[in-house]
Amino acid sequence: MRMYDIIMKKRNGGTLTGDEIAFFVEGYTRGEIPDYQVSALMMAIYFQKMTGQETLALTMAMAHSGDMLDLSAIHGIKVDKHSTGGVGDKTSLALAPMVAACGIPVAKMSGRGLGHTGGTIDKLESFPGFTTALSQEQFLENVNRIGIAIMGQTADLAPADRKLYALRDVTATVDNLSLIASSIMSKKLAAGADAIVLDVKTGSGAFMKAEEDARALAAEMVRIGNNAGRRTIAVISDMDQPLGYAVGNALEVREAIDTLKGGGPSDFRELCLTLGTQMLLAGGKTQDPEEAQDMLQKSIENGDALRKLAQFVEAQGGDARAVYDPGLLPHASLQLPLAAPVSGYVSHIACDEVGICSLMLGGGRETKDSQIDLSVGLVLQKKVGDYVEAGEVLAILHANDESRAVQAGERFLKACHIGTQAPGKRPFIKEVLTDF
Ligand code: URA
């Protein structure tokens, strides 16, 4: 088999066989096929697309390119959750303890943030001392003992995706449905859970801006997961404005804690309950969605979910006192209120721009090696549809550097549109996809 023939076949609109796909994935992972040939193939795939069969074969080849985690030492059905990423997305911080408090083990691999979206690991590191550098034994032991463990992605998990993603990132071949679906699902399959609940975002802060694209991606991932023998469900949720009010690592941790105490923003609570319900159903806790939702609500009301968060933080070396006293979390030295220039309804908040404001304050990474400031970010005071008087506060910036705060503040005010008419309501949860 020759890489040249595979590139030409795809360039001409042909369908690659499973063997041809395995050949290039294995050869590229081993360093035997050069970047320039794989770049050409990625571009051919970008234009000619892949069939469902090809996408599944690509996913399986990437999943098997490194370690396939064996979670069989963990009792019960293991359910993983994955978000396609967004602004203010602190969902795992509240959802994992809620689900674990209901008796479903959460054994999760998470990533760090890059660009305008944040990563769960960075957020968790707001707890002083918290680490995700667990050995595999510790990881399994923690899940069996307390019901949750979160680990950083190891280099040995789907290494083909790591190489391919880095290449796609610099060759303008990221935004192809088959390539995104196979990239996400290869990591999820290799991470070993029995069932997978996907949170596919749509809107201005999401990868998939258009709802129909998000739906197509969700359907493809559900189909891949189910074909690979893992029960897979996708929830399509709105990311046209930040999730909740807080954007920025420690600020988001505070909001997740508030939610576990029974408060928190209504959209965030709705998302945790919707995803949690699907996780409890997939984990075999009950077959009744209403009962699942009641169990999750109860885990908040009786304090079990908050205690679960504290146990989890402590088990991974973090200062669990911060769960009960968020004053112990990192906090910024400056708070800058941003006032509405005119009266009216908040008609649109450009979500990706809000993520960039947090990045400008130091809360995100421009490159993989950037250091981040866990304390900075912003807390919205108004969301889309709210009425605001001129001079009323739209958001509060949390910063450690005045000039960065001023620049980020100017950018935020441009991103926040105020109109005379109340905007139409966008449903927050668009759809739950279960089988294809
Ligand atoms: N996230 C991934 O893991 N891979 C993609 O291709 C896009 C988003």
Image (cartoon, helix red, strand yellow):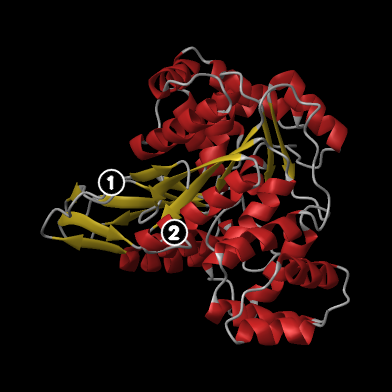
> Where does residue 240 sit, x and y in percent of width and height?
35, 56
Q: Nearer the viewer, mark 2 or mark 1?
A: 2
Question: Residue 166 vs residue 46: left or right?
Answer: right
Residue that numbered label 2 is attached to: 216
Amino acid carrying label 2: it is Ala
Residue at figure coordinates x 43%, y 30% from the top left: 273
Three-letter amino acid code of the residue under disc 1: Pro
Q: Where is residue 134 drawn, in percent x and y?
A: 82, 38
Per the model, the C-alpha gap separating discs 2 and 1 is: 18 Å
Q: Secondary structure at mark 2?
A: helix
Compared with 302, 142 (above or below) is below
Q: Residue at x 53, y 32 (%)?
A: 94
The answer to whether 264 is drawn above or below residue 321 in the figure is: below
Residue 137: name its quadrant.
Answer: top right
Is residue 155 at least partly visible in the picture? yes
Residue position marked by numbered label 1 in the rendering: 427
Query: Residue drawn 80% across and 51% down?
Result: 154
Query: Is residue 425 rendered to the left or right of residue 407?
Result: left
Question: In the shown orientation, is residue 119 left or right of residue 389?
Answer: right
Does any portion of residue 244 appear in the rendered image? no
Q: Secondary structure at mark 1?
A: loop
Point out the tag, 2 or 1, that comes first from the N-terminus. 2
